[in-house]
Image (tube, rainbow, N blue to C red):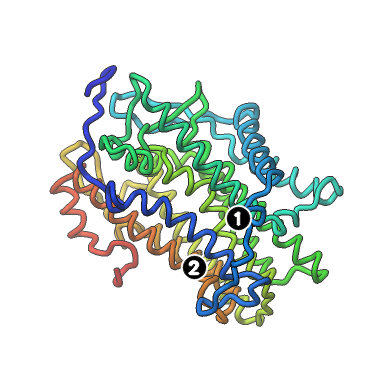
Amino acid sequence: MTVKGFSNPKTTHFEFGGPIGAPVVMLLLPAVVYMLFFMCNKDKGDCSPFTFPDLTALTWSDLFDLNALFVYIGWFAFQALLYVVVPGPICKGLPLRNGDVLNYKCNGMAAFYISVVSVLGGHLLGLFDISYLYTHYLHLTTASILFSSALSVFVFLRAKRPGVMLALGGNSGNALYDFFIGHELNPRIGDFDIKFFCELRPGLIGWAVLTFGMAAQQFKESGEVTIALLLVSLFETYYVWDAFNSESSLMSTMDITTDGFGHMLSFGDLAWVPFTYTLQTRFLVDFPIRLSPLFIVFVIACQFTGYWIFRSANSQKDLFKRNPHHPSFADVETIQTQRGTRLLASGWWGKSRHINYFGDIIMALAWCLPCGFSSPLPYFYVIYFSILLIHRERRDDHKCHNKYGKDWEKYCEKVPYRIIPYVY
């Protein structure tokens, strides 16, 4: 089908097991979020994967609280208000397949600062107690799942209106699959881009705020915040800060350029990220760890090494995409493509085809190491994240092979390693 100068071709390449796998994933992921909570908390008494909690007395009121739902909706609305009213530079997206370029308000850093000051200031002034985020963690988890699911339904139904540019991967004709993978490419209400907003704002800032709540709970219980919890909170909060510091680079990511906004991104951004990525800080509240000075130095070294690789590689890639003739690329090796563009084949991108993912994995490990080695469950994040990045690399490889053809094969011969130099 061709609409307003662009086509919405039928999707023929499926991911996540296609029409059969998509509904399974939609049921499995919320179950994993709940499993991580029930398998690792103070009431259970341990974080062992070999012992199981007694859930026979579990009721709906243990899972759902109306006030928690209002808190979650209020947080989302607060972030949406900041997105709309706070000034910020306009970032240009990459050209769509009809040649149009969308504008995005990149005021995320201001929203981050306002959010952090509001939350911490309100707590210190006694207006509210952010240890609520720990004591009502399960209720907020359920609220995020319900809200993200409702948002998924909303954007899917809106995508049925005429003249909408659909995602190339989300127009299969199978309603469940398209609902999961994302039907519309850029769902917007006026200038409010729902996908771009959800990518960083409510969930990512919410992740940082949740770590503050875990620290507040530990301080309330023991009168201190341990070095282990402090390190994880600082590392994760800095990661969130860095995402906003490089907000403009988001325009060239697969999530923005390629993926539609459906249940996969809605649930991932609003529920999965804040309520699985805080497992380590929640663990450290329930099972405090004392770290030796030497181990602290090792953890910090892992964090800084991973960040150096991650940020410098991403910055080089983003600059090259936007200005391949920048003086810093005068002596780098590139591969000319038949599309008229060039592929970076030296520098960071000569070491592996996704060297930035290697840095991400090292940082993920640094966020888990302060939890010690009494249980593998606090290492869920680095294990899951590694699997996610391997899958994402495969998706990107498939996309680039279709896009560049033999030129991509030439690049793969030049740079044989996918993520970890000399290993994988």
Q: Residue 287's quadrant in the figure?
A: bottom right
Disc 1 target residue: 238
143 to the left or right of 129? left
331 to the left or right of 230? left
Contact, mark 1 vs mark 2 (Cβ under 8 Å): no
Q: Position of residue 383 (x, y in %)?
A: 44, 68
Q: Position of residue 119 (x, y in %)?
A: 74, 46
- Give the residue displayed 58% in from the left and 66% down from the top: 38
User: Which residue occupies the foreground of this view, 220 or 336?
Assistant: 220
- Give the residue displayed 65% in from the left and 43% down from the top: 69
Residue lying furthest front in this view? 56
Residue 322 seen in this snapshot: no
- Give the residue displayed 32% in from the left and 42% down from the top: 177
Q: Secondary structure at mark 2?
A: helix
**Image mark for residue 380:** 2
Amino acid type indicated by mark 1? Tyr
| Mark 2 nearby-residue class (10 Å; few <14, some 14–19, many ≥20) | some
Amino acid type indicated by mark 2? Phe
| Mark 1 nearby-residue class (10 Å; few <14, some 14–19, many ≥20) | few
Distance CA(mark 1)–CA(mark 2): 20 Å
Front label number (1 vs 2): 2
Q: Is residue 103 above or below residue 345?
A: above
129 to the left or right of 133? right
Q: Position of residue 216 (x, y in %)?
A: 76, 60
Residue 136 seen in this snapshot: yes
**Image mark for residue 283:** none
Q: Is residue 155 above or below residue 16?
A: above
Which quarter of the rendered picture does the C terminus lie within?
A: bottom left
User: Which residue occupies the foreground of this view, 372 or 93?
Assistant: 372
Which numbered disc flags the more N-terminal residue, 1 or 2? 1
